[in-house]
Image (cartoon, grey):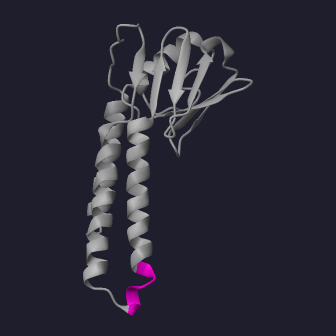
Amino acid sequence: MGIIFPLITGLLLLYADFQSGKKLKKNVHGQFHLRLNKSYKWIGIVCCLIGSFLLNAAISHWNEEIAFFAPFAVLIFFVMGIVILVWYYNYQLVFDDRRIISTNWMRKKRIIEWSDIENIKFNTKSGYLKLYTKLEKIIILQHSTGFIEFLKLMELKTKFRAEELRIPLKI
């Protein structure tokens, strides 16, 4: 059992990196459309299923010893699963040669022009690429399908390079 979870995590990260490097085609409007990869959807579903299993077990084996911990454990898995699913279905990034449109997990849209970008930072631990303008900040997730396409355009439109930002993908 001690090797299964690291193995599953490694496989999920390998899949996420594969999806990040996937080539995308422009849509009819000349835009790229990035979304989170499908592993987020399946992790959310699995968390909700675990929460359902724990809820069923807590109800069928209810006693005073589990009165505090059982609802807490059920709540952790349900909340985690729902947040991941909401994030998967709502997050998107649309960009073209002129601008970037980001929709976060709460469906809040932010629009910036490539020329307005003042700084870009990449966090290697979280996998977030943060674009800064004077008024806005957009967060782009490394595990978005087709992230490599964004990096290519970023290097063309800004002075920032993926290698200098220490982004672990080959362009």
Q: Tell me the quarter of the picture where residue 154 sits.
A: top right
Most extreme residue toward the front is 59
Residue 165, magenta (yes or no): no
Q: Image quarter for residue 109?
A: top right
Residue depicted at 33% across the width and 58% down the height:
47
Above-or-below relation of 59 to 134? below
Q: Which residues are magenta?
A: 64-69
* Residue 37: % across, % down: 34, 36
Viewer-proximal residue among 169 and 59: 59
| Residue in the image at 39% along x and 30% along y | 35
Vertical position of residue 134 compared to residue 113: above or below: below
Q: Position of residue 152 (x, y in %)?
A: 47, 16
Residue 116 visible in the shown view: yes
Task: Give the quarter of the figure containing the C terminus.
Answer: top left
Note whether 8 is above or below 76 in the view shown.
Answer: above
Kindly tell me whether residue 171 is visible in this rendering: no
Front residue (pair 164, 82): 82
Tell me which corner region of the image, top left, top right, bottom left or bottom right, holds residue 92: top left
Q: Is residue 110 above or below residue 77?
A: above
Please tell me which residue is depicted at 29% across the width and 52% down the height of the picture.
45
Residue 146, image x and y in percent?
Answer: 37, 25
Magenta region, mostly helix, strand or loop? helix
Q: How many marks?
A: 0
